Amino acid sequence: IAAGEDIIHARYEAPPGNGVEGAVQVRYDSVPMAGDMRVYGRVLDHSGRPLGQIPLTLSAGAGQVEAHTGADGWAAASVPMPSGFEPLVVEASTANRLVRDVAIRGGQGLGGPGTPDLKDQVALSIRPGNVENIELTVEPAILYAGQRATAFVSVVLRDRSGLPVVSEAVELEASEGTLDEPIQQDDGSYVAEYSPESGDRSRDVTITAKVKSSGRSATTRLEVVASPINGAIGLVLGGITNFGQVNPAVGLHLDLRTAWVGRTMMFRLGVGQHWNMSEIDADLGDPARVRLIIYPIEVGVMLRRDHRGRGIWLGVMGVVAPYWSQMRIGDDVVGSGVGALPGISFVGGVGFRVAVGEFVFELKGLALPGPRGDLSYRGTVGGLAAGLGYRIVY
């Protein structure tokens, strides 16, 4: 045991003897009221050592059984008991010696084979040494911030022999958050519960264990990270260029985490708006100006990685882009129409957790064919978009 009370037991069993008989012993088990009684006899030499292969007669009252001793000097037999309630005379005898004892029916036995010739015991008080080492661990080592975030701090004090020291008090400190009083466990360790400060942000927390009596201390680091984003919704404002002009663009996105690809895959549903202008020489004096207002609707998947409050993602979307178009020559409207364009987009972005959401920067490549027909459009309808935004996360 590491500390407390222990008992040291000592027992002696004599080695085999030789020579003639020096003593005979008789023993028996618990005495029944009727039936057979288990009787033991033992033969020893003059030095108290057991003698084997000695003929021995065992009796209880009128019943007798012949037996021979074994290497330990003992012989055993079940002897029939006479009827009645009177005490029994139990005997063990050899050709030269006889020993008697009195047994009471229903009484306790006197032992037999397996009982040591000598035995003793002494109580020993065990006290651990001084604290030489402090084992400090935190489980889990990475804690996601949140209302129910909890980590368990475990401390084991050991002396130079590696035995736990249970008689010393431990003090625990944390650079932030709340640490409960350590509670000693059955194995000698101390365990305390830790809760971080509120706030969904990433930071390192230093936890220190001290033992005043020895002046020793140990520290460990707990990494508190912002809870992983399961969903986000927000706006991105920026611009889009078709490499001929730059126009404003806006997007509204809903991202939802899935269980696929190690929970790194996210589903996105988005809708946006931007517009484009194009001029066409119609040989009518003033050029024809075509204006397109486009509302891309995107559905797709992204792969997102988060670390310490920062996220990075890449994705691909299928796009259906309803649009409204209008053609003017001079100040006159000569036509308008609506339609929808199929396309594809590729997106990449980074996010930084702030308060209940995250600031994001995204780049997007939007590939859309130009409309055809009476109100045709010259130039690229999609293009390269960039934007900044803020999203509420949960």
Image (spheres, rainbow, N blue to C red):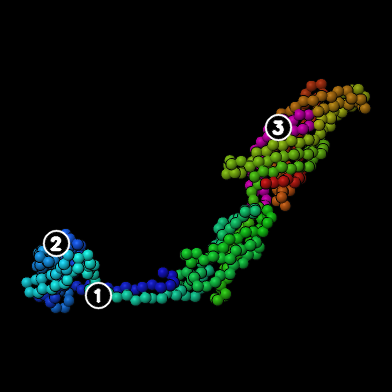
The reply to whether discs 1 and 2 touch (Cβ–Cβ < 8 Å) is: no
Task: Assign a secondary structure to mark 1.
Answer: strand
The N terminus sits in image quarter: bottom left
Q: In the image, is 96 to the left or to the right of 265?
A: left
Label 1 and label 2: CA atoms lie apart by 37 Å
Q: Is residue 393 above or below residue 212?
A: above
Please provide the residue range marked out in magenta. 294-323
* Residue 2 on the magenta segment: no
Task: Assign a secondary structure to mark 3.
Answer: strand
Residue 142 is at least partly visible in this image: yes
Label 3 and label 2: CA atoms lie apart by 106 Å
Name the spot of residue 264 as percent of width and height, x first.
61, 44
Q: Which residue is mark 3?
A: 319
Q: Which residue is mark 1?
A: 118
Q: Earlier in the sequence, mark 3 or mark 2?
A: 2
Q: Earlier in the sequence, mark 1 or mark 3?
A: 1
Quadrant assignment, res 113: bottom left
Q: Which residue is mark 2?
A: 83
Q: In the image, is 187 to the left or to the right of 360?
A: left
Name the spot of residue 173 as percent of width and height, x first.
62, 67
Q: Earlier in the sequence, mark 1 or mark 2?
A: 2
Q: Is residue 331 above or below residue 256?
A: above
